[in-house]
Image: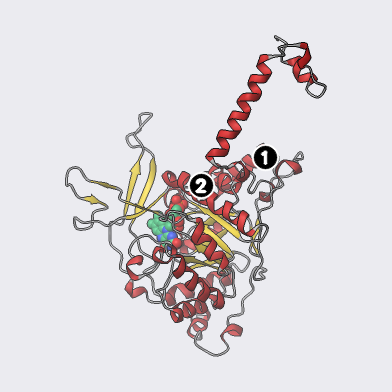
């Protein structure tokens, strides 16, 4: 097994040369900014809209990325994702010592909307998990990354990693994942359960000083683009996102799951999901989190625009995506890519075809020929409440003035003559 041999040579001296693989074109840092051409570039589209994106120098056939979690747990499912046409795959989060990761079952609980239209059960709208990061041995995961990159050299594979508060451990993990030929790294600063007890995941993403230090170690070591995946379980998500970018990360991914308790069983009086009668707060995902994710991504996008202007940092929107419209919303507020995790767990890998078709329909409706044509187009329409009040008062004054008509012939003006005439017409 060639790949096994290569992995076993990781500790060797000339490991970079030994692992040299064909990769998608990549220059670090190569960044994608917030360019909005929108209506200025509207033209009648005869050809199909182009869904391809280039993010931090990585080319993807479409913006749909498998989010870190069960859909990226092993070679078989990641291969399936590439075969079905996903734009990129982010593997399940890995760490140096998987033997410390011990999962329980059941570890999922779902929330359904009220049953309707004669169906016995309502649609699943919320999903809670108490799953930890990957419990598979690091060697196995690295071997599978290497094999995938050999078989799909032109497709984008991103490793998701997490480690304890230990510089040497982060450096070793980065070194080892990079040797497999992966194209980028997403740092899980956001897992809300289990891992914070070991000062990992959200424990780092919620502490800007810790985050700055750990990002410094990571970015001094990494040679591929690094995305920081942020937790929504914090008052202002834009603050750690800014720290991550200032500390050398190329992109931000948001959001990870929202800390939640799915419910209490009213018969047994025990919380769900129940493991031997006990539970622990978990991470909430799926459709119900989409509006919260939009709010968080919007505030990160606003911060990125105001703090970093046209610098080409990337933004990956995550949370409750099941339709092309859900994805379009993330892109309209500035996301370059859109990740899907629970949607794949509910609908399977073929979902990407529906997502692409629906996103294309949206683009055709507006005559957008590329993702950049509308990326960020809705962002300028978010303002403060005070500004909404001012705008509404101005609009009311204008409508009143028009409705009133002229009280006296002395009120006619040259500039407003046509409007003034119209204000006194009855039909
Ligand atoms: C069962 C499950 C396991 C997950 N495991 C990870 C993980 O290992 N690493 C990670 O960064 N995010 C993990 N996530 C979070 C997702 O990647 C994603 O951020 C979140 O679920 C919101 O997106 P969604 O609504 O599309 O699922 C997991 C989510 C679920 C549902």
Is disc 1 placed on a helix, strand or loop?
helix
Residue 194 higher or lower than 257, as above or below: below
| Foreground residue among 316 and 67 | 316
Is disc 2 placed on a helix, strand or loop?
helix
Mark 1 — residue? 364
Is residue 273 visible in the rendered image? The answer is yes
Local crowd at mark 1 within 10 Å, few (<14), some, or many (≥20)? some
Q: Position of residue 224 (x, y in %)?
A: 59, 72
Name the outermost residue toward the right: 414
| Quadrant in which ligand 1 is drawn | bottom left
Residue 220 higher or lower than 86, as above or below: below
Q: Position of residue 401 (x, y in %)?
A: 67, 20
Mark 2 — residue? 294
Residue 229 higher or lower than 4, as above or below: above
| Foreground residue among 283 and 135 | 283
Q: Going by the image, does 87 lie left or right of 46?
A: left
């Amino acid at each position: 097994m060639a790949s096994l041999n290569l992995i076993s040579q990781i500790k060797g001296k000339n490991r970079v040369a030994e692992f040299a693989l064909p990769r998608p074109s990549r220059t670090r840092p190569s960044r994608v900014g917030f360019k909005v051409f929108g209506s200025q570039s509207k033209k009648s589209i005869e050809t199909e809209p182009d869904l391809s994106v280039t993010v931090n120098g990585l080319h993807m056939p479409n913006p749909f990325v498998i989010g870190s979690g069960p859909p990226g747990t092993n070679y078989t499912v990641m291969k399936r994702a590439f075969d079905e046409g996903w734009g990129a795959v982010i593997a399940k989060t890995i760490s140096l010592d998987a033997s410390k990761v011990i999962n329980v079952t059941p570890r999922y609980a779902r929330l359904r909307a009220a049953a309707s239209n004669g169906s016995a059960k309502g649609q699943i709208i919320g999903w809670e998990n108490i799953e930890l990061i990957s419990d598979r041995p690091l060697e196995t995961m690295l071997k599978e990354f290497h094999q995938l990159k050999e078989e799909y050299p032109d497709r984008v594979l991103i490793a998701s990693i997490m480690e304890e508060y230990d510089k040497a451990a982060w450096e070793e993990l980065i070194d080892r994942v990079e040797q497999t030929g992966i194209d980028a790294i997403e740092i899980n600063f956001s897992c809300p359960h289990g891992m914070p007890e070991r000062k990992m995941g959200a424990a780092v993403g919620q502490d800007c000083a810790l985050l700055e230090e750990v990002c410094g170690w990571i970015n001094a070591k990494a040679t591929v683009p690094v995305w920081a995946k942020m937790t929504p379980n914090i008052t202002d998500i834009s603050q750690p996102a800014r720290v991550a970018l200032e500390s050398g990360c190329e992109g931000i991914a948001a959001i990870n799951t929202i800390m939640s308790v799915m419910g209490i069983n009213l018969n047994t009086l025990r919380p769900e999901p129940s493991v031997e009668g006990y539970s622990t707060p978990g991470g909430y995902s799926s459709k119900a989190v989409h509006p919260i994710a939009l709010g968080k991504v919007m505030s990160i996008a606003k911060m990125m625009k105001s703090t970093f202007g046209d610098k080409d940092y990337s933004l990956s929107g995550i949370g409750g995506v099941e339709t092309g419209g859900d994805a379009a919303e993330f892109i309209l507020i500035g996301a370059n890519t859109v990740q899907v995790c629970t949607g794949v767990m509910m609908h399977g890998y073929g979902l990407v075809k529906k997502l692409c078709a629906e996103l294309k329909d949206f683009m055709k409706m507006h005559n957008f020929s590329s993702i950049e044509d509308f990326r960020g187009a809705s962002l300028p329409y978010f303002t403060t409440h005070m500004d909404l009040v001012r705008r509404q008062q101005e609009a009311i004054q204008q409508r009143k003035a028009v409705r009133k008509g002229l009280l006296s012939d002395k009120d006619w003006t040259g500039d407003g003559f046509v409007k003034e005439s119209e204000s006194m017409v009855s039909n």
